[in-house]
Image: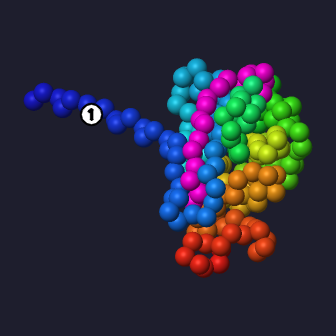
Amino acid sequence: MAAAAAVAAPPPSPPPLSGGDASRSVGDHCKFGVLTVSDRAAARVYEDLGGPAILDEIQRAVLSPWETDYRVIADERAEIEAALRDMVDKSGCSVVLTTGGTGPSPRDVTPEATESVCERMMPGYGELMRSLGLKHVPTAVLSRQTAGLRKKALILNFPGKPKSISETFAEVFRSVPYCVQLAGGPYIETRPEVVDAFRPPNDRRQAKGGAGG
């Protein structure tokens, strides 16, 4: 008998580039930048997994209407800085989430690029991600993730591995909407069953239908 022909695996689903539910949300439209920093992913030696993992988390967590500017670039400091500036200044992103390039190897320069383009640093985010990561692996202490504000936008370094992103995203994102709101950016509403975002009662908008938010 002839051998059965091999069945090709289906191509991966494209990452979500927009979402939310304007009919239910009291939040403003928000644009997210998702920036993967990886020499090999940029050269297409392998498929980017970190960026789509962040996009999936945004899709699950954010109820406000949103869209994304998703890019994959090499571990080149000047290129990272240029991309971050462009995402905030020209593309209009209110939140930029990077993945990759935060370790101790010589090519890991995402934190330096982030610090260079930010006007004010938010070091608590890096401290939080390291503390969350240490619950799972001792090497989380090697991460140099940081965050900062450029104009009204928050730039935040996430880990490079999808598993690490999923282990930290919900807890880290709890404070992101209020941080962006305080910086003068849009009101971002989350799905509380996924990310229970914190806001003081006086800074919350009333939910549609008249119930308190």
Find the residue positioned furthest to the left: 1
Q: Is residue 123 left or right of residue 209?
A: right
Residue 142, image x, y percentages: 81, 42
Residue positioned 59% across, 78% down in the render: 210
Residue in the picture at 68% in, 38% down? 92
Foreground of the two, 209 or 155: 209
Q: Is residue 118 left or right of residue 48?
A: right
For badge 1, the amino acid type reads: Val
Residue 78 magenta-highlighted: yes
The correct choice, above or below, for 46 with respect to 188 in the image is above
Q: Is residue 9 above or below residue 169?
A: above
Indicate yes or no whether the magenta region holds residue 101: no
Q: Which residue is mark 1?
A: 7
Decide: few, some or many residues near mark 1? Use Cα within 10 Å; few <14, some 14-19, many ≥20.
Answer: few
SS at mark 1 in the image:
loop
Residue for point 38% across, 35% down: 11
Which quadrant would the C terminus be assigned to in this image? bottom right
Q: Quadrant of residue 49?
A: top right
Look at the image and name its color scheme.
rainbow
Which one is in front, 2 or 175? 175
Tell me where the magenta segment starts and ends, as one range.
61-81
Q: Is residue 137 visible?
A: yes
**Place of residue 52 in the rendered image (x, y in percent of width and height, measured from the top left):** 55, 41
